Image (cartoon, rainbow, N blue to C red):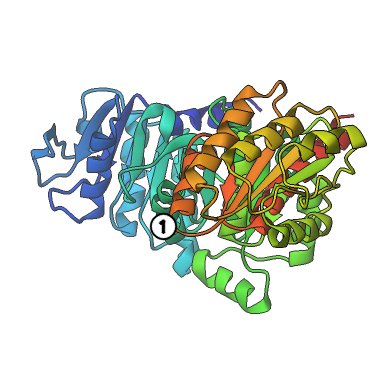
Amino acid sequence: MEETRSLNDQIRYLFYPRSIAVVGASRKPGKIGHIILKNLRDYGFKGKLYPVNPHATEILGFKAYPSVTAIPDEVDMAVIVVPAAIVPQILKDCGKKGVKVCVVISSGFKEIGRVDLENMIVKIAKENGMRILGPNIFGVYYAPSRMNATFGPLEVLPGNIALISQSGALGIALMGWTVLEEIGLSAIVSVGNKADIDDADLLEFFGKDEHTRVILIYMEGIKRAREFMKIAKQVSKKKPIIVIKAGRSSHGMKAVASHTGSLAGSDQIYSAAFRQCGVLRALNIEEAFDWARALSKLNPPTQKNTVIITNGGGIGVMATDAAEENGIPLLEPSEELMKKFRKYMPPFGSPRNPVDLTGQATHKEYYGAILEALNSPEVGSVIVLYCETAVADPGKVADAVLDAVNSSKIAKPLVVAMVGGEATEKAIKKLNKSGIPAYPTPERAVSALSALFRWTSWREKTVS
C-alpha cells in the first residue's frame, strides 16, 4: 500500500516538475527533440531545462549534457526522445539520477508487437520507483506550470478542461483546433500505449486538481477497467467526465487493435459501464467539445424548466424538437410571465414557449426578454436563438445576452445558438470568449444543455 501511494505521488511531478531533462534534444529544427525543448522554453516553463545529447555542448541556449547522470542538479522529469531500443538504458540512467517520472515519446513498443520491450521498460521503472507516461505519445501540457512538453503547436489557450488522448495525431490536431474554437485547456496528456500511467491514474489526479473543471478523454480501450470505473464514479460526483470511446463498429475495433495495441471490448458493455459511473459518452469530437464548453462554464440548474427565446419560428421549432429528443423539459409559462414577455414583441409574436420575438426584434428586445427569463422563479434555464437579420446586428445581440446575464439576479444555465454569416460567427466567438456557451445550430446548443442536465441528474441521484 505504501509503495502504491508513493508511485501515485510521483504523478504530481508530471504536472509540477521543478526541472526537466529532454533526452534526445536536437540542434536541428524540425526534429522532435528540438521542437519539445523549444516549446518548453517559448511557452514559458519556469523550472530548469537540461538538454541531453552526447554530441552537443549547447542547444537553444541551454548547456547540453552527454547523459542524464551527468546533470549536476536534481531532475524531476525526463522527456525521452530516442529510438526504442535505447529507452531501457536511458531509464536505468534516470533511475540512478532519481528522476520521478519519464515521458517516453518514443514509438516501437507494444503497438508494433514489441510487448517484451514494453514490459522491460515498465520493469525498470518500477525497480527504480519511477512512473512512465507512454510510450508512443506526443507529450504533456499543463497550463498552471506554463509547461508545453509536446511536439504539437506552441500556443494553447489556458482554461479548465483537461484533455486525455490515446491518439497522438488527434491530440496534436486538437491543440490547434481548440485555440480556433476559443476552448481553454488546463491540461493535455497523451497516453499512447498506457504501459504504466493510464486513464485511471490521470482521473484521480484531475479529480483533485483545482485548475480542472471538466475531464475529456479520447480512448480506444481501458487498461484497468474496474479501477477506472471505481475512480470515475467518485470523480463524477464532483466533476463531469466526457469520453469519446472509439472502436464502436467491428471494423473500428480491428483498427483500434492495430493502432495502439488496445484490446477493444463490447461497445454495449462500455456504454452501460459509463452510464453507471456517471460518464457522459460523446460520439464524436464536435459533440464532446460542445458538451465540455457548456459544462466548463455553466452552474448546475436548480430546476429544469427551460425557456427558448428566438427571433425565428423555424429555429424555435427545431430547438423544441431537439429539447424533447434530449429529455429537456420545456416550461409552460404562467400568464404573468407571458405578460412580461409580450412587452418585447409585436402583437403577432408569441409569448408562449418558444418565446417568439419575431424577425422585428432588435438587441433591445432580446435583452428585455432574456432578463425576464433569468429573473423569473419559474425558469430554470434559457436557450437563446438568433437568426441573422438586417434588423438585429449579431454583435449587438451578443452584447445584449452578456448584459442580461450580468444584470440578472440569479446565475442560471444559458446557452446560445446563432445562425448566420461571418458577422454571426464573430458574435459566437465573442460569447464563447466571454464565458457564454454559443453554437452555430440550435441542435448543438440543446445537446450541450442536455449534457449538463444528465450529469446533474446522475449526481443528484448518486450523492443522495
Q: What amino acid is labelled 1 in the image? A: Ala
Instruction: Give the side of residue 352 with respect to residue 119, left or right.
Output: right
Instruction: Give the side of residue 42 with respect to residue 165, left or right.
Output: left
Which residue position holds label 1? Answer: 173
The residue most toward the left is: 57
Nearest the viewer among 62 and 183 is: 183
Residue located 73% across and 61% down the image? 318
Quadrant the N terminus occupies: top right
Residue located 46% across and 49% down the image? 181
Nearest the viewer among 22 and 317 is: 317
How many numbered marks does the figure carry? Answer: 1
The residue most toward the bottom is: 251
Q: Position of residue 9 (x, y in %)?
A: 54, 27
Instruction: Tell me which corner region of the image, top left, top right, bottom left or bottom right, holds residue 300.
Output: top right
Crowding near pointer 1: few (<14 within 10 Å), some, many (20+)? Answer: few
61 versus 189 height, above or below: above
Residue located 69% across and 26% down the image? 411
Instruction: Give the side of residue 397 with respect to residue 169, left or right.
Output: right
Quadrant the C terminus occupies: top right
Nearest the viewer among 214 and 196 is: 214
Could you tell me if residue 278 is visible in this image?
no
Kind of element beneath mark 1: helix
Q: Position of residue 165 (x, y in %)?
A: 51, 52
138 versus 210 height, above or below: below
392 versus 405 height, above or below: below
Q: Position of residue 461 (x, y in %)?
A: 88, 36
Could you tell me if residue 411 is visible in this image?
yes
The residue most toward the front is: 347
